[in-house]
Amino acid sequence: KARTVANEIGRAYGILRNSYSISSKEVLNLLSMLRLGTDLGMLPEEHRGTIDELFMRTQPAHLQQQLDSKLTGEERDALRADVMRDKLKDWPPPSTQDLDVITPGQDKQEKQAKKKDPQTDE
Protein backbone atom coordinates (compact mmCIF):
# COMPACT_ATOMS: atom_id res chain seq x y z
CA LYS A 1 0.00 0.00 0.00
CA ALA A 2 2.83 2.42 0.80
CA ARG A 3 4.30 1.72 -2.64
CA THR A 4 0.99 2.62 -4.31
CA VAL A 5 0.76 5.93 -2.45
CA ALA A 6 4.41 6.74 -3.16
CA ASN A 7 3.83 5.91 -6.82
CA GLU A 8 0.84 8.26 -7.11
CA ILE A 9 2.73 11.10 -5.42
CA GLY A 10 5.81 10.52 -7.55
CA ARG A 11 3.74 10.47 -10.73
CA ALA A 12 1.98 13.70 -9.73
CA TYR A 13 5.34 15.36 -9.14
CA GLY A 14 6.69 14.14 -12.47
CA ILE A 15 3.66 15.19 -14.49
CA LEU A 16 3.42 18.64 -12.91
CA ARG A 17 7.14 19.26 -13.24
CA ASN A 18 7.37 18.18 -16.87
CA SER A 19 4.06 18.96 -18.60
CA TYR A 20 3.68 21.48 -21.39
CA SER A 21 -0.12 21.44 -21.41
CA ILE A 22 -2.39 20.46 -18.53
CA SER A 23 -6.07 20.96 -17.67
CA SER A 24 -7.33 22.62 -14.51
CA LYS A 25 -9.05 19.39 -13.42
CA GLU A 26 -5.85 17.38 -13.76
CA VAL A 27 -3.83 20.04 -11.92
CA LEU A 28 -6.28 19.98 -9.00
CA ASN A 29 -5.99 16.20 -8.71
CA LEU A 30 -2.21 16.21 -8.97
CA LEU A 31 -1.78 19.11 -6.53
CA SER A 32 -3.92 17.14 -4.08
CA MET A 33 -1.44 14.29 -4.38
CA LEU A 34 1.46 16.69 -3.70
CA ARG A 35 -0.37 17.97 -0.63
CA LEU A 36 -0.70 14.36 0.54
CA GLY A 37 3.02 13.96 -0.11
CA THR A 38 3.65 16.92 2.19
CA ASP A 39 1.34 15.43 4.84
CA LEU A 40 3.28 12.14 4.67
CA GLY A 41 6.69 13.83 4.82
CA MET A 42 7.62 12.90 1.26
CA LEU A 43 7.92 16.58 0.33
CA PRO A 44 9.27 19.34 2.58
CA GLU A 45 6.67 21.08 4.73
CA GLU A 46 7.83 24.46 3.41
CA HIS A 47 6.26 23.59 0.02
CA ARG A 48 2.74 23.46 1.47
CA GLY A 49 2.22 27.21 0.96
CA THR A 50 3.31 26.97 -2.67
CA ILE A 51 0.90 24.08 -3.25
CA ASP A 52 -1.94 26.12 -1.74
CA GLU A 53 -1.00 29.11 -3.90
CA LEU A 54 -0.97 26.92 -7.04
CA PHE A 55 -4.48 25.64 -6.32
CA MET A 56 -5.63 29.24 -6.87
CA ARG A 57 -3.12 30.50 -9.47
CA THR A 58 -3.85 27.67 -11.91
CA GLN A 59 -7.61 28.27 -12.11
CA PRO A 60 -8.83 29.59 -15.48
CA ALA A 61 -9.88 33.05 -14.26
CA HIS A 62 -6.62 33.59 -12.38
CA LEU A 63 -4.57 32.65 -15.43
CA GLN A 64 -6.53 35.09 -17.60
CA GLN A 65 -6.23 37.80 -14.97
CA GLN A 66 -2.47 37.23 -14.86
CA LEU A 67 -2.21 38.07 -18.57
CA ASP A 68 -5.10 40.52 -18.52
CA SER A 69 -6.69 38.89 -21.56
CA LYS A 70 -9.20 36.25 -22.59
CA LEU A 71 -7.42 32.94 -23.30
CA THR A 72 -8.56 29.88 -25.20
CA GLY A 73 -8.63 26.57 -23.34
CA GLU A 74 -5.46 25.49 -25.12
CA GLU A 75 -3.68 28.72 -24.14
CA ARG A 76 -4.78 28.32 -20.50
CA ASP A 77 -3.57 24.71 -20.43
CA ALA A 78 -0.18 25.77 -21.79
CA LEU A 79 0.16 28.71 -19.39
CA ARG A 80 -0.90 26.50 -16.47
CA ALA A 81 1.85 24.01 -17.36
CA ASP A 82 4.39 26.84 -17.62
CA VAL A 83 3.42 28.08 -14.14
CA MET A 84 3.74 24.58 -12.70
CA ARG A 85 7.14 23.91 -14.26
CA ASP A 86 8.44 27.26 -13.05
CA LYS A 87 7.22 26.79 -9.47
CA LEU A 88 8.43 23.18 -9.16
CA LYS A 89 11.77 23.51 -10.99
CA ASP A 90 13.84 23.64 -7.78
CA TRP A 91 11.85 21.13 -5.76
CA PRO A 92 13.52 17.90 -4.69
CA PRO A 93 11.86 14.67 -5.79
CA PRO A 94 9.53 13.04 -3.26
CA SER A 95 11.35 10.99 -0.64
CA THR A 96 10.12 7.55 0.43
CA GLN A 97 12.57 7.40 3.33
CA ASP A 98 9.85 7.66 6.01
CA LEU A 99 7.45 5.28 4.25
CA ASP A 100 7.53 1.51 4.43
CA VAL A 101 8.16 1.06 0.71
CA ILE A 102 9.57 -2.42 0.22
CA THR A 103 11.23 -3.60 -2.95
CA PRO A 104 9.64 -6.81 -4.28
CA GLY A 105 11.51 -9.77 -2.82
CA GLN A 106 13.05 -7.65 -0.06
CA ASP A 107 11.10 -9.46 2.68
CA LYS A 108 12.36 -12.79 1.41
CA GLN A 109 15.95 -11.56 1.26
CA GLU A 110 15.77 -10.19 4.82
CA LYS A 111 14.34 -13.47 6.16
CA GLN A 112 17.08 -15.46 4.41
CA ALA A 113 19.73 -13.13 5.84
CA LYS A 114 18.32 -13.65 9.37
CA LYS A 115 18.46 -17.44 8.94
CA LYS A 116 22.14 -17.18 8.00
CA ASP A 117 22.93 -14.83 10.93
CA PRO A 118 20.54 -15.39 13.85
CA GLN A 119 22.22 -12.56 15.82
CA THR A 120 20.43 -9.98 13.65
CA ASP A 121 17.12 -10.77 15.36
CA GLU A 122 15.69 -7.74 17.11
Image (cartoon, helix red, strand yellow):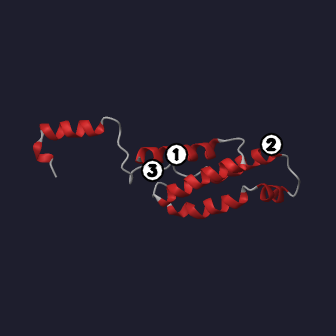
For badge 3, the amino acid type reads: Ser
In this image, 57 relative to 32: left or right?
A: right
State whether residue 22 is above or below residue 46.
Answer: above
Residue 26, image x, y percentages: 66, 47
Q: Which percent across, then down, holds residue 68? A: 87, 58
The mark found on residue 95 in the picture is 3
Mark 2 or 3: in front is: 2
Q: Could you tell me if the residues under marks 2 and 3 are in contact, i.e. CB atoms within 8 Å? A: no
- Work out which residue is located at the far right of the displayed protein and give it: 69
| Mark 2: secondary structure | helix
Q: Nearer the viewer, residue 78 or 107?
A: 107
Q: Label 2 is placed on what type of residue?
A: Glu
Numbered disc 3: secondary structure: loop
Residue 56: image location, x then y, percent: 70, 61
Real-space CA distance between mark 2 and mark 3, rounded to the nearest whole angstrom: 33 Å
Which circle marks residue 8 in the picture?
1
Q: Amino acid at mark 1?
A: Glu
- Spatial distance from mark 2 to mark 1, Cα to Cα? 26 Å
From the viewer's perspective, is 92 left or right of 111? right
Q: Quadrant of residue 113?
A: top left
The CA distance from mark 1 to mark 3 is: 13 Å
Q: Nearer the viewer, mark 1 or mark 3?
A: 1
Taking the spot 15% from the left edge, 47% from the top edge, the residue there is: 120
Residue 74: which disc? 2
Q: Earlier in the sequence, mark 1 or mark 3?
A: 1
Q: Is residue 104 left or right of residue 92?
A: left
Name the residue at 35% across, 43% down: 102
Which numbered disc, 2 or 1, marks the residue that appears first in the sequence? 1
